[in-house]
Amino acid sequence: MTPPVREWRRDGLVISTDPLRLDLDAVHAFLSRRSYWAEGIPLDTMRRSIAHSLPFGVYDGDRMIAFARVVTDYAVVAYVADVFVLEEHRGRGVGKWLVEVVMQHPDLQGLRRWTLATRDAHELYRRFGFTEADPTRLMDKLDPDVYRRR
């Protein structure tokens, strides 16, 4: 299922779910060089991850300034991933608005579980009802060095 492209506007900015509008080079530059969670991610891997997700780009004119994606089955579960705002655009509420739009997307309503991983943005996500997961129930299998071994 591919939901229709949607757009939201606020204060001269646009959030769009149009995958063709994404600046994939900018996303890759941030994720591979400036994120702690996807450092070294190969371009092809990143492209595939976006192709199999619902992407959200935030634009100031033609320039993409923020990004997020949701991995979902559109019925039960959604995983929020790769959320970032370029450094020079932080402090303007862009991240809050982006997460708000993600959480209110019409095709993501009625899901049983939303999940994400963060090292430093707990307060942002708490605003939207996220809490620390129950460690007695949720499990992970993490391979943090997978990109280094390629």
Image: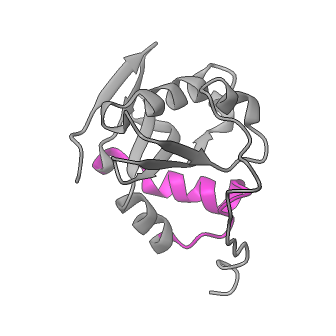
- Where residue 138 sits: x, y (%)? 67, 57
- Give the image's coloring scheme: one colour
Q: Residue furthest top?
A: 11
Q: Is residue 36 magenta?
A: yes
Per the rendered image, the range of residues in magenta is 20-43
In front here: 131 or 34? Answer: 131
Left or right of 89? Residue 56 is: left
Total number of numbered discs in the rendering:
0
Q: Is residue 18 magenta?
A: no
In front here: 22 or 52? Answer: 52
Left or right of 70? Residue 117 is: right
- Where residue 116 sits: x, y (%)? 61, 48
Left or right of 72? Residue 123 is: right
In front here: 39 or 124? Answer: 124
Residue at 59 percent across and 29 percent down: it is 95
> In the rendered image of this protein, does residue 83 appear above or below residue 58?
below
- Where residue 27 sits: x, y (%)? 52, 53
The C terminus lies in quadrant: bottom right
> In the rendered image of this protein, does residue 11 appear above or below residue 142?
above
Q: Which of the 4 image quarters holds residue 63? A: top left
- Where residue 59 sits: x, y (%)? 43, 32
Left or right of 68? Residue 147 is: right
Residue at 74 percent across and 41 percent down: it is 132
Q: Which of the 4 image quarters holds residue 92? A: top right
> In the rendered image of this protein, does residue 114 appear above or below residue 12?
below
Residue at 73 percent across and 37 percent down: it is 121
